[in-house]
Image (cartoon, helix red, strand yellow):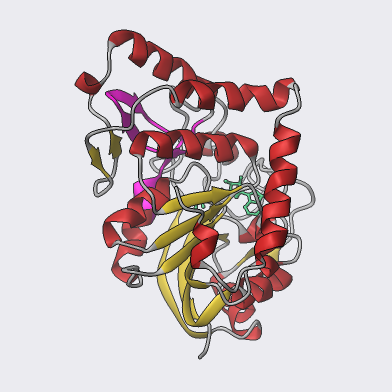
Amino acid sequence: MEDYLTRLPAARQQEIRDLRAAVAARLQQPKKGFQRFRDPLAAVRTLPPARFTDFSGDKIVIGRAEEISAPQRQLLADALRAFMPWRKGPFSLFGIEIDAEWQSFMKWNRLLPSLPDLAGKVVADIGCNNGYYMFRMLPHQPRQVVGFDPVLQHYHCFQALNHLAGRPEPAIEPLGVEHLPLYPGCFEVVFLMGVIYHRPSPITMLREVRQAMQPGGVLILESQIIPGDEPVALFPAERYAKAPGVYFVPTLPCLINWLTRTGFSRIEVAAQSPTTSEEQRRTAWMTFESYADFIDPARPERTVEGYPAPWRAIVKAENPV
Ligand SMILES: C[S@@+](CC[C@H](N)C(=O)[O-])C[C@H]1O[C@@H](n2cnc3c(N)ncnc32)[C@H](O)[C@@H]1O
């Protein structure tokens, strides 16, 4: 497939290619941690791309059961198990049903009424995980979708899924939001979902995101929030709802102030709702603790650490022309 960078002339091509080469060289090292995902990806690549796909429903369907033989299905099932825990989904892959921790369609359905026009656009999905949302974008006919996720599990899992899907529009880079300065003015739509509270400097990050957008480009910012009308952010002592690596969890007014003060305009709240154990829960494909374990059973409006229980918000904003 043609390298998507040819469609992004403003990107700092050589530096991106050098970073890719450095990651690829690192991944070739005979380390267990690298082989853990490289081997199942190689196994999936022995299978043919699906004849039938459907990205328009809650469950992403890639391939029907009858398209592959029983030994091929066994190979696929083993490879898919190697990508556990599955956080985002659901997927149906050649008849293998993957129920992920998050019912990711619930977020997509909240976003859908405010979805910007993606037709013919160059889109980034930052923190794309296994690409669930990149696949959901495809029926909206983007020209190019670039996913960024530095976590090797997700980087490999997406490549396995997209080998099976056989689609040319989505691509993934093993890079993080901190690499966006390599993409000045490149993207017409940016999805930044579930990432901002994991960054120690949300303001620096939003500035870098805006610089990677074309003038008039649209940002879809989705975040965990705490309820409240004051423009403040929670900074947990250690963990928030048992999650490590959480820095600032804003109220909705605080999130809006971050956007305003980093130069975004036309800020619109698309949705806000509490997280529930219907949306996030333990499944056969994600067997660790989940939402119900993160919340104080005696006070469901509090996390186990005693902090306000998480809500989530989706905000749409524009990079001014
Ligand atoms: C909470 S998940 C959100 C996934 C998805 N965007 C969603 O909304 O459901 C956060 C994602 O960010 C990824 N991530 C971790 N470090 C990152 C970084 N430095 N830049 C971008 N994404 C990162 C994680 O691997 C993970 O897939």
Q: How many labels does the image show?
A: 0
Left or right, 127 with reference to 199: left
Q: Which range of residues does the magenta coloring cover?
A: 86-107
Q: Quadrant of residue 223?
A: bottom right
Residue found at the very far top of the displayed protein: 71
The residue depicted at 65 percent of the width and 82 percent of the height is 262
Q: Quadrant of residue 50?
A: top left
Magenta includes 90?
Answer: yes
Res 84 visible = no
Is 161 above or below relative to 20? Answer: above
Magenta includes 292?
Answer: no
Q: Looking at the picture, how far across and down is residue 268, in whole percent?
A: 43, 79
Is 120 above or below relative to 247? Answer: below
The residue depicted at 58 percent of the width and 21 percent of the height is 39
The residue depicted at 29 percent of the width and 40 percent of the height is 59
Left or right, 92 with reference to 240: left
Left or right, 222 with reference to 112: right
Is 20 above or below relative to 29? Answer: below
Is 161 above or below relative to 181? Answer: above
Res 29 visible = yes
The residue depicted at 31 percent of the width and 56 percent of the height is 109
Q: Quadrant of residue 244?
A: top right
